[in-house]
Image: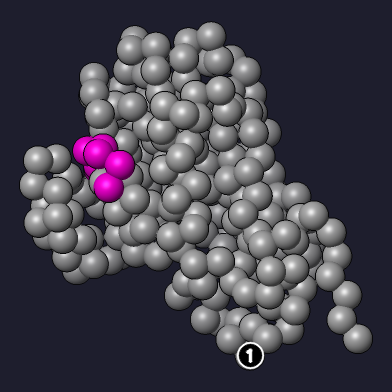
Amino acid sequence: MLVAVTGGSRGIGRQIVCALAEAGFDINFTYRNSLDEAEALLVELRSNWPGQEFSTCHLDLANRVQVDELTERLSETDTLYGLVHNAGQSCDALAAMIDQDEAEKTMQVNFWSLTRLVTGAIRPMMRARSGRIVGIGSMAALHAMPGNSVYAATKGAMLSYLRTVAVELARKGVTANFIAPGYVDTEMMSAYADHREQMEKQIPIGRFAVPFEVAALVSHIMSPAAKYITGSILPIDGGMSAGMTLHG
C-alpha cells in the first residue's frame, strides 16, 4: 500500500516518511527546494527497506498547476492508501499588519492545496473502501497567539475541512484526522532560539517535541488499530492544550 507525504525530505516530514517505511508502506514524498536531501533520503530508504517502493517528486504547493498535476496522479493510483499533508508555510504578522498577497499564498499552501490533493486521493480510497487522510496542523488552530492570525486561520481552515471530510467519508472506510503539534525541535524553530528557554517554561512537560514523536502518531493513525479514529483533533504538545503552566 502506498502513502503520499507532502514535504517529506526533512524535518517532521522526513521522520514521517521513515516511520511509515518502518511500518511497511510504500512511500511517495514531495519536496520543494531540498533536492539533495530528498535524493539522500531515497538512497537511505531503498537501502533499509529493499522490498518496498519509494519515489519522490518536486512540488511547490503555491503552484496550482503542479498541485493539480499531482492530484490527477493520485486519483489514478489504485494502491494509494494514505495522504499526509505535512508541508506548510508560516506567516508571522500582527493582525493589523497583514499583507494580503502573502496571506493568500499561505492559505494556498496550507489549505487549498490540501483540498485539491484530497479530491484526487479519495477516489482510489473509496474504490478500495479503505484509506487514511492526515493533516499536520498546529496548536495555533486551537489557541490564539500574537502575530499568528493568518497562519492560525489557515490551520483552522484545515481542521474544519478535515472534520467535514471525516463525516462525509466515514461509511466509505476513509478516515481523516488533524494532528496539532506544539513546539517541535526542527530547523524552523531555530529562529526562536533566543526565546527557547522561556517557551519551554510554558510547556508542562518542559521541552520541545522531537520530530519522531509526531511521526509515531502519524504511523499509528495509518495502522489498522486506528480505523475507528476519525474527525479527531490530536494534540501533541507536551500538555500545553491541557492548561496553563505558571512560573514566577
In front here: 17 or 56? 17
Residue 147 percent coordinates (x, y): 74, 68
Which quarter of the figure is the N terminus placed in?
Answer: top left
Q: What segment carries the magenta color?
A: 22-29
Residue 73 vs 142, above or below: the answer is above
Element on which disc 1 rests: helix
In front here: 153 or 177? 177
Residue under numbered circle 1: 194
Q: Is residue 145 magenta?
A: no
Residue 200 vs 168, above or below: the answer is below
Q: Residues within 10 Å of mark 1 (few under 14, many from 20)?
A: few
Residue 7 visible in rendering: no
Instruction: Please give the name of the residue rendered at 32% of the width and 17% of the height, measured from the top-left corner.
Output: 124
Q: Is residue 209 left or right of residue 48?
A: right
Residue 200 visible in rendering: yes
Residue 16 percent coordinates (x, y): 38, 52
Instruction: Please give the name of the residue rendered at 51% of the width and 72% of the height, measured from the top-left corner.
Output: 185
- Total labels: the figure holds 1
Instruction: Please give the name of the residue rendered at 58% of the width and 45% of the height, measured from the top-left corner.
Output: 179
Residue 9 percent coordinates (x, y): 30, 60
Q: Is residue 156 left or right of residue 90?
A: right
Residue 126 percent coordinates (x, y): 40, 13
Residue ranking furthest to the right: 248
Residue ranking furthest to the bottom: 194
Q: Amino acid at mark 1?
A: Asp
Q: Is residue 218 left or right of residue 17?
A: right
In front here: 44 or 169? 44
